[in-house]
Image (cartoon, rainbow, N blue to C red):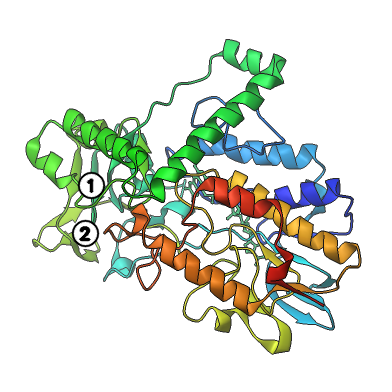
Amino acid sequence: MAGILSAIKLREAGFDDFTVYEKADRLGGTWRENTYPGIACDVPSHLYSYSFAPNPEWSHRFSPGSEIQAYFEEVADRCGVTPRIRFGSEVGRVAFSGGRWQLETKDGGRDEVDALIAATGVLHHPNIPSIEGLDRFGGALFHSARWDHAVKLDGRRVGIVGTGSTAVQIVSALVDRVAKLSLFQRTAQWIMPQENPPYSEAERAAFRRRPELLRSAYAELGSLFHAFSGGLVDADSPEMKAIERACRANLEQSVRDPMLREKLRPSYRAACKRLVMSPNFYESIQKPNAELVTDGIERVEADGVRTRDGRLHELDVLVLATGFRVDRFVRPMQVIGREGRSLDAVWSRRPSAYLSICVPGFPNFFMLNGPNGPVGNFSLIEVAELQLGYAMKLIELLRSGRCREISPSAEATARFEAERSEAARRTIWASGCRSWYLDDRGVPMSWPWTFDRFRDEMSAPKLEAFELR
Ligand SMILES: Cc1cc2nc3c(=O)[nH]c(=O)nc-3n(C[C@H](O)[C@H](O)[C@H](O)COP(=O)(O)OP(=O)(O)OC[C@H]3O[C@@H](n4cnc5c(N)ncnc54)[C@H](O)[C@@H]3O)c2cc1C
């Protein structure tokens, strides 16, 4: 998504000497790799689209992953980006030397560039939990982002570890196909009710005929989500209270068995973890062949999962819906800045960046969806578009000859990070739960202010925060 976006916008701005490096043999990133049953976006499709490439053809309010993948392929083809992608080319090392970035790919390729945009993703490196005996499982075992479509699921016993958005989507998609579905829950999740109606042919035809309808859908959904962001960053806001009420009512009204209801009731506030949305998770987990397992996992054995109460849950297939290593960003790529300093060393405690885009000592290096940016049920496409707009204004300074190297000052970055961490402690994400939003100190790794403030900040770089050489 972010790499295609960069190529389109660079070209529009008249930059023609660029290359997109992609380690896989197909574009799509997240949507190429996540093909599990039930995968869909949980931001409405008309918002989870590039602002400049609205799509009248979305089939549902929240469209399936395969459609999103097809959308990115179609936009990349239409905008002439696909031929500019060097597929099967993993960037292994980039080093700033002699005023330019020296780039090396794992297959021995080399390049020298003035500026680098890291569009390497956030939810990209699967997180494999350290559960004893995982390697001894006799059935099929895979992470949700590495779904093995050769494995038969119908009529079999399937276990799913994890209860985030992915697990919830998989449960709803599989429960009617499998003989037995066991969901291993470490932490209960609040579930926001979600309706996912299809768009009728008449509605799609209207979108095709009248592009202004698409533009207003994008704008209206955007305002709704931006207002929601105001709630997230103020844990006591009326928006937060409304979300909590909706989640609680969903649980109370949808789950009949009081014991199951209590097992599904989180002990923390709604939206403290990334809010899970589902039209039918509660209905699915109440089916007779579904079981919510809340006794912790002791170990995995050849025949299944042994929980701490001593019970063996016999399984044919075990799916790890255990998320991603969200502290990786451009890594494992080696990034070497001025004076031979590696990004890995700079980030040895935890990743950080000025406005989540650039790092002191790493000139002309710009990240999209980098550390501590807006997360939490936004469209990351919108986030990347704003960040790219900001980076392009800095790249423009290089092109115009105003400077040859640009990077944020250490002082501005430290000040930003201190203010950010302070504000992050007041958000809903810090209201008392364990989640992938939290860093090693328990501070949310996110933009802690409103989306409007983010947009304002992205509208024009404050050059006093930068060192220009
Ligand atoms: C299951 C799932 C559901 C999601 N749902 C939503 C949603 O509803 N709404 C939302 O806003 N976001 C959602 N996201 C987040 C999603 O990751 C982003 O929306 C978006 O797709 C990220 O795009 P990206 O281009 O930044 O990164 P990615 O899609 O991760 O793409 C990064 C690309 O860079 C390549 N790459 C990485 N390192 C290198 C290297 N060293 N050399 C060469 N190539 C490299 C990768 O192969 C990949 O193709 C979801 C994520 C997941 C996993």
Quadrant of image for the C terminus: bottom right
Say which of 368 and 396 sits in front: 396
Query: Are circles 2 and 1 on residues that touch, CB within 8 Å?
Result: yes
Position of residue 42 measured from the top left corner of the image (x, y, whole percent):
46, 38
Q: Is residue 154 visible?
A: no
Vertical order, 449 against 54 (above or below):
below
Vertical order, 152 against 92 (above or below):
above
273 left or right, relative to 217: left
Vertical order, 176 against 33 (above or below):
above
Say which of 399 and 21 sits in front: 399
Secondary element at tag 2: strand
Position of residue 326 measured from the top left corner of the image (x, y, whole percent):
47, 63
Q: Residue at x 63, y 49 (%)?
A: 456
- Where residue 169 sits, quadrant-wise, is top left
Q: Residue at x 85, y 66 (%)?
A: 398
Under mark 2, the amino acid is: Val
Q: Is residue 211 visible?
A: yes
Position of residue 255 measured from the top left corner of the image (x, y, whole percent):
17, 33
Q: Which residue is disc 1 drawn over?
A: 182
Give the number of the disc on residue 305.
Answer: 2
Secondary element at tag 1: strand
Under mark 1, the amino acid is: Ser
Question: Which class describes the residues within 10 Å of circle 2: few (<14), some (14-19), or many (20+)?
Answer: many
